[in-house]
Image: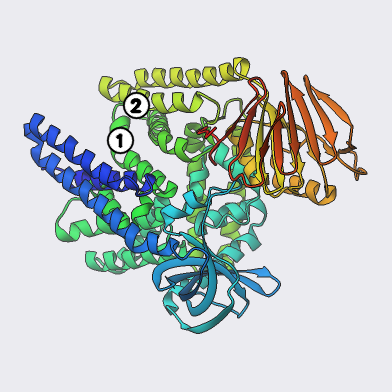
């Protein structure tokens, strides 16, 4: 049986993935369905009985692992919701938040159950891996309109959040080696940003340390829209550069393969700690360790086998990670690069620069198409310019990363750091300039929320790759790719031209709310007592549906504070603000009670504590604590989900936090 690890690893992953996205409620159903499918295949496919048996056992093992993990950890931790418990463990991360308060992440036990918790505590001059003990009131992490926190944190094994600790004490020091690594990371982070500065410094430190805190929101959006946002994820590229540099240095001192392997392995895992042990870097470290160890055991490394063996190891340690965005993207991209791309590039025959560029183009498009299903699951926008930007910009980023690594390996010595990081600065300035140019090209990216664009993308994304492989023709694959992209753009434009109706999405928060009235790609925002607290949720909605212009924002109270929040936090800036008071600048206009505004057939009237909106024969009242559609009122004070109002049909429905799925309860 060839490639046993692939059959075992894929079946194991599939079982954990289904159980995780099913929230553990349907584990028995999945197990029974797997047995039925396996028995049917066992009878019909006699030549593959061994494969079927291996896959079934692996799948059922995954179901058992998920069930056990849910019972032992998830259920016990979430049962602590609302209780004050004792937290014991080591500080893995901390930051000063002001007013003599720190934000701590502690890994250890929470109420006697193994877990990880983030909470606030009085500043006691903490350090990495200090051992602490605290009394903290914990609550279960829940999704909100601003952020799908539970969906994000649960796959990472984080189920609870803490308030401010009632009392906390440092009980000892932890791992000094790991502490030294974290101190060195902080030193490099500061050094890079001091020498390079601006967004270029934030870009360089994000590539090396995985910390994007010094990047502006607009720059991050530009980089992701241009299709090279993956460069921020510390992963295989970083690990390979570190390993290659260390391997070259060791080979000059010793010819013993075992010495080289030992030193490289220590260096790679030290860097993994340096980068925060993220899913992608741990995956890369495990893979490189397995590949490097293969010759010592007289084995030939196989990318697919190594990858799936790595998946089994990581998912056994953290079963819920099977539904984690970082895990899925990292493993999908690695599988495509290691297994699919070589076969795709082999279809290009010839030598020279043009053929080399053609092979790179084939690889870039193959990666885009094969990772599309994962992107559609997690991202608001899909970059279509990604193949071009990856061919042109990733090599420059890789060079900049290599130079940054040289700075880190040499201890940040000024004689090396200043000239090297200055070169990095200009390389990344070029990258950011081109990324901004690419992101502004027509159809450089498409919002996946436009119906039925997401479904069309999902159904058609693998057709060009399949055609290229089965017909063994790059030209035919290129033609199908171009045809597919034209289809996507046609669907997008058709949806805008003929499917556009005036809609309002209402995001409630107790008595307050924020709303967006939109038609196609243009909209207007309303803030009724929210003071911009739901800006993140509103911006996610704008990105998801491709709303790139806000004609105005209506602010009902505390105008100075609210307008400041909008200016600082919203990428799509309103053309003007309509305020219930005296204007502070030319961008603000008074819109007092009784004032009226007509916007493309939509009439807006200011009420005492809200707004009356009339369009397409429908009248909507947005007021504190309620939404009224043609006289039918809905209490929003206890609503946790956004509400969508279709003005044409006078319908209102509740959606989930992803907006795009449109799962309405009424």
Q: Nearer the viewer, residue 350 or 512?
A: 512
Q: Where is residue 204 in the image (x, y as percent from the top left)?
A: 56, 54
Q: Residue at x 14, y 33 (%)?
A: 41
Whether the residues at callouts 1 and 2 have beta carbons within 8 Å, the answer is yes
| Residue farthest along the bottom direction in this orientation | 171
Q: Which of 638 and 321 is in front in this view?
A: 638
Q: Which of 465 and 425 is in front in this view?
A: 465
CA separation in Å, label 1 and label 2: 10 Å
Judge left or right: residue 453 versus residue 38. right
Q: Where is residue 600 in the image (x, y as percent from the top left)?
A: 77, 20
Mark 2 Cα-neighbour bin, 10 Å: few <14, some 14–19, many ≥20: many
In the rendered structure, find residue 136 and report the number of the disc placed on it.
none
| Residue farthest along the front direction in this orientation | 632
Residue annotated with mark 1: 340
Q: Is residue 302 visible?
A: no
Judge left or right: residue 238 versus residue 13. right
Q: Is mark 2 on a helix, strand or loop?
A: helix
**Quarter of the rendering occupied by the N terminus:** top left
Q: Where is residue 606 in the image (x, y as percent from the top left)?
A: 84, 34
**Quarter of the rendering occupied by the C terminus:** top right
Q: Which of 126 and 18 is in front in this view?
A: 18
Q: Where is residue 478 in the image (x, y as percent from the top left)?
A: 40, 21
Mark 1 Cα-neighbour bin, 10 Å: few <14, some 14–19, many ≥20: some
User: Where 244 falls versus 515 (above or below)?
Assistant: below
Q: Residue at x 36, y 19 (%)?
A: 475
Q: Which residue is drawn at 26% across and 22% down?
A: 470
Q: Is mark 1 on a helix, strand or loop?
A: helix
What is the quadrant of residue 201 in the picture?
A: bottom right
User: Where 323 falls versus 541 (above or below)?
Assistant: below
In the rendered structure, find residue 465 and report the number of the disc placed on it.
2
Q: Which residue is drawn at 48% across and 70% down?
A: 106
């Amino acid at each position: 049986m060839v490639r046993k690890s692939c059959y075992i690893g894929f079946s194991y992953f599939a079982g954990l993935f289904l159980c995780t996205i099913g929230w553990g409620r349907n584990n028995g159903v999945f197990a029974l369905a797997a047995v039925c499918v396996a028995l049917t295949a066992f009878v019909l496919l006699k030549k593959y009985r061994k494969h079927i048996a291996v896959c079934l056992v692996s799948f059922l093992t995954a179901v058992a692992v998920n069930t056990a993990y849910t019972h032992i950890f998830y259920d016990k931790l979430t049962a602590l919701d609302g209780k004050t418990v004792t937290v014991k463990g080591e500080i893995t991360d901390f930051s000063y938040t002001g007013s003599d308060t720190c934000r701590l992440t502690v890994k250890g036990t929470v109420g006697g159950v193994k877990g990880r918790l983030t909470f606030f505590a009085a500043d006691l001059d903490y350090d990495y891996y200090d051992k602490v003990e605290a009394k903290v009131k914990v609550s279960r992490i829940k999704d909100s309109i601003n952020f799908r926190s539970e969906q994000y944190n649960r796959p990472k094994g984080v189920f609870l959040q803490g308030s401010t600790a009632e009392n906390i004490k440092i009980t000892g020091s932890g791992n000094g080696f790991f502490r030294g690594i974290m101190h060195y990371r902080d030193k490099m982070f500061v050094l890079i940003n001091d020498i390079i500065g601006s967004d270029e410094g934030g870009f360089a430190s994000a590539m090396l340390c995985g910390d994007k805190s010094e990047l502006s929101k607009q720059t991050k959006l530009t980089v992701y829209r241009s299709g090279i946002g993956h460069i921020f994820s510390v992963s295989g590229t970083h690990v390979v550069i570190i390993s290659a540099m260390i391997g070259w240095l060791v080979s000059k001192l010793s010819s013993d393969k075992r010495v080289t392997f030992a030193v490289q392995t220590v260096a790679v895992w030290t860097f993994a700690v340096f980068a925060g042990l993220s899913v992608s870097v741990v995956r890369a470290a495990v893979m490189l360790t397995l590949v490097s160890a293969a010759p010592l055991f007289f084995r030939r490394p196989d990318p697919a086998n190594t990858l799936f063996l790595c998946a089994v190891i990581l998912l056994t340690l953290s079963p819920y990670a099977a539904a984690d965005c970082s895990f899925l993207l990292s493993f999908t991209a690695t599988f495509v690069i290691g297994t699919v791309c070589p076969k795709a590039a082999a279809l290009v025959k010839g030598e020279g620069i043009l053929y080399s560029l053609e092979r790179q183009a084939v690889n870039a498009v193959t990666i885009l198409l094969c990772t599309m299903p994962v992107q559609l699951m997690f991202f608001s926008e899909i970059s279509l310019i990604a193949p071009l930007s990856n061919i042109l910009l990733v090599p420059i980023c890789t060079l900049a990363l290599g130079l940054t690594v040289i700075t880190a390996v040499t201890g940040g010595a000024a004689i090396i750091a200043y000239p090297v990081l200055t070169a990095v600065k200009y390389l990344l300035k070029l990258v950011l300039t081109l990324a901004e140019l690419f992101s502004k090209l027509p159809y450089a990216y498409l919002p996946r929320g436009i119906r039925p664009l997401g479904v069309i993308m999902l159904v058609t994304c693998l057709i060009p790759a399949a055609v290229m492989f089965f017909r063994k023709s790059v030209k035919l694959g290129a033609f199908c790719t171009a045809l597919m992209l034209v289809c996507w753009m046609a669907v997008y434009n058709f949806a805008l031209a003929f499917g556009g109706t005036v809609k309002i999405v209402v995001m409630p928060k107790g008595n307050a709310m924020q709303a967006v009235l939109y038609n196609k790609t243009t909209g207007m925002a309303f803030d009724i007592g929210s003071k911009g607290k739901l800006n993140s949720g509103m911006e996610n909605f704008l990105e998801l549906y491709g709303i790139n212009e806000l004609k105005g924002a209506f602010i009902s109270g505390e105008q100075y504070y609210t307008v400041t929040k909008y200016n600082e936090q919203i990428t799509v800036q309103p053309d003007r603000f309509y305020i219930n008071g005296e204007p502070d600048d030319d961008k603000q206009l008074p819109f007092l009670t009784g004032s009226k505004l007509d916007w493309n057939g939509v009439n807006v009237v200011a009420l005492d504590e809200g707004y009356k909106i009339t369009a397409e024969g429908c009248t909507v009242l947005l007021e504190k604590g309620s939404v009224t559609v043609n006289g039918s009122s809905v209490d929003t004070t206890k609503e946790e989900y956004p509400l969508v109002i279709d003005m044409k049909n006078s319908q209102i429905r509740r959606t989930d936090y992803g907006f795009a799925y449109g799962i309405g309860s009424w």
